[in-house]
Image (spheres, coloured by chain):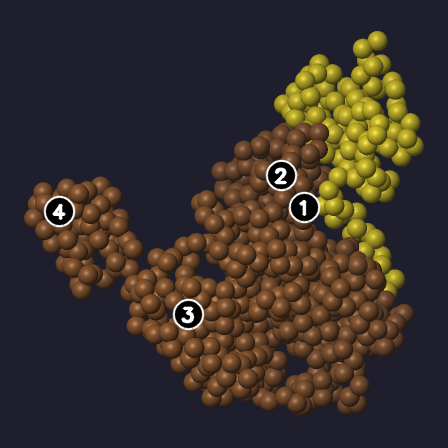
Chain colours: A brown, B yellow
Amino acid sequence: MIRSHVLICGGTGCTSSGSQKIREHLENELAAKGLSDEIKVVQTGCFGLCALGPIMIVYPEGTFYSRVTNEDVSEIVEEHLLKGRPVERLIYNDGAEDKANEHGVSSLSDTNFYKAQKRVALRNCGVINPEVIDEYIARDGYMALAKVLTEMTPDDVINTLLASGLRGRGGAGFPTGMKWKFARAYENDQKYVCCNADEGDPGAFMDRSVLEGDPHSVLEAMAIAGYTIGANQGYIYVRAEYPIAVQRLSIAIAQAREYGLLGKNILDTGFDFDIDLRLGAGAFVCGEETALMTSIEGNRGEPRPRPPFPAEKGLFQKPSILNNVETYANIPQIILKGADWFASMGTEKSKGTKVFALGGKIHNTGLVEVPMGTTLRQVVEDIGGGIPNGKKFKAAQTGGPSGGCIPASLIDTPLDYESMAAIGSIVGSGGLIVMDETDCMVDIAKFFLEFTVEESCGKCAPCRIGTKRLLEILDKITRGNGTLEDLDKLEELCYHIKANSLCGLGQTAPNPVLSTLRYFRDEYVAHVVEKRCPAGVCKHLLRYTIDPDKCRGCTACARVCPAEAITGKVKEAHVIDPEKCLKCGACMEKCRFGAISRK
Amino acid sequence: MKTLAELQAIRDSMKDKVSLRNGTAGMRVVVGMATCGIAAGARPVLNAFVEEVNKQGLTEKATVTQTGCIGICQYEPVVEIFEAGKDKVTYVKMTAEKARRVVEEHIKGGKIVHEYTIGAAQN
């Protein structure tokens, strides 16, 4: 009889920090202690606190162990699982009030990181074993599909989604019910349901986590979509760079077919629906809906003009819908708990919850799911645990290369579609990169432009040529060769690219430039006029100098300089030749007297 | 192929197995599992509680868990039952047999088995 479950994260983050080895070791230790029949080891999807991996949770206590090593495993087995004494030193402590239980053991749900979260799309991630369909069923899995097939008409489903206020979680925020309604309205003998799992924004990984931690929720929602719009075939377009997600999806599809939850005559209702995987090769543009469908068809992934919209002519020229992974993951819950329940969360126009991938200069790197309208401050300070190393919050970049930045002065902005658009950013896919005072905003804009230039498919000129020119101007500025006219030129070019590009990639590519120009124009001006990078990032604008009063003439710097830019006699002050200096900073690291400074 | 009824059957049978992960239910049955407890036979007691709670379908109502040394080693195996708003009940010198009776009468029936409690043992 099982008395305790030990959950180990098998998401990509924890896998790369060694959770597989930890699991094997744990199983061996349990066997050696004769506990295999009492304690069950469960591999789950992502818990969200990726920075603290490998993560292990012991139920029923809910004891949360972080950064577990092989040696720790032996101790946990011996102390906690055998003798019932949780290993205090390994328990994650984020300073949350330790109200936990009588033993003073901090339980997962009591941590600051989880307390403020509301998990809907991630409800099963870190709770079930994603490779066991029965565990999904135990948590009411496939009950929404059963309800739809036996009790609801397609129009009921559409009305429920419309009433719930669910909007696309991939970035654009289009009402999901409307999308389904359009696709349902077009008569055709063949329609398709597609899932966009081509998560490409740097810094966003919520779709991966859902696929790894709860793949069946996506399959179930796609079958519901098939019933609603009148399709019997679905495709999940997932990037090949997500090997664990691909593997778990394959397992999930095979299990669902075995149970007859995919295939012919599902639940004996006469409804047929099946799903196949299509692996993307990693082109960012393939996350755009028309390019994604073109790629599924076996062609080079390039967008095409809309209209016709996919609801009319999509995949293989047939009426199709495409929804994002996170959008799908919400749907079974909406069907089961009702539109009112979903609409009770969030703001007036942005309903439900949103998953954000916290990254950058933040304590708790990971995934958080909060009601729409939660402020950036709550996410960064309360849940994210603030900025490490005592640095100050400078800005957050949301929505990756399609989004913009939110400066510190607007940290109380609610994270919802409308409020974000009003300040020139977007919710986007939910990537949230936190920056501190050591990040240069011009450099950030340049980073995202490098990405879009690389990823532009080249089909339309505004995007192909325009983003390249943007990047060149930004590069010129970071080298100290920019002029004030360049700033105006940047802005003008941004608007041209936005207005004239064929697809979302080009239309949103200038956003990082526009929003940094809007909120950090003084930083651009410092680069252009003073030839100075205030954050000390842009290499070409840095000046390394030696303070002759502090220099002892030990020659350490001169010996380490790869460019032989430092000269001076032994026991006399040295000098750096700015012409020769590569700004590598090696001398500064080497100097034991703090004589070298960077400005 | 599964029918809806079969799907529901899978759900119902699996629900108890994953309910352990919902955290602690209303009643907490804590078995002392330190060296003293284990030496006195706490392991079969713990297993009996887990088995019986599952068998009787009480997993929604009670969670069986373990703890370290409670400090009254001469009375081991010790089992404590916590319930919100009620006084803690401490059972001492437990056996698997006694455990099954506690599940039946206390957890299911709500009646404390006084003869097994520490109060009875001290008198």
- Image location (x, y in percent) of residue A393: 50, 52
Q: Is A151 left, or right, of A325 in this rendering?
A: right
Asked if the residues shown at circle 2 and circle 3 are in contact, with their CB atoms under 8 angstroms apart, the answer is no
Q: Is A464 left, or right, of A126 in this rendering?
A: left
Q: Is residue B95 visible?
A: no
- Estimate how packed mark 2 is, as few (under 14), some (14 to 19) or many (20 or more) residues with alpha carbons within 10 Å: few
- Estimate how packed mark 1 is, as few (under 14), some (14 to 19) or many (20 or more) residues with alpha carbons within 10 Å: few
Residue under label 4:
A573
Find residue A446 and name its label.
3
Between discs 1 and 3, the one toward the N terminus: 1
Q: Secondary structure at mark 1?
A: helix
Amino acid type at image mark 1: Lys
Q: Name the subunit of mark 1.
A: A
The mark lying in front, picked from 2 and 3, is 3
Pick whichever, A486 or A170, lies toward us: A486
Please identify the quadrant where the N terminus of chain A is shown: top right
Amino acid type at image mark 4: Ala
Residue under label 1:
A115
Between discs 2 and 3, the one toward the N terminus: 2
Please identify the quadrant where the C terminus of chain A is shown: bottom left
The mark lying in front, picked from 4 and 2, is 4
Amino acid type at image mark 3: Lys
Q: Are marks 2 and 3 on the same chain?
A: yes
Between discs 4 and 2, the one toward the N terminus: 2
The mark lying in front, picked from 1 and 3, is 3
Amino acid type at image mark 2: Ala
Q: Name the subunit of mark 4.
A: A
Q: Secondary structure at mark 3?
A: helix
Residue under label 2:
A96
- Distance Cα–Cα, label 4 vs label 2: 52 Å
Asked if the residues shown at circle 2 and circle 1 are in contact, with their CB atoms under 8 angstroms apart, the answer is yes
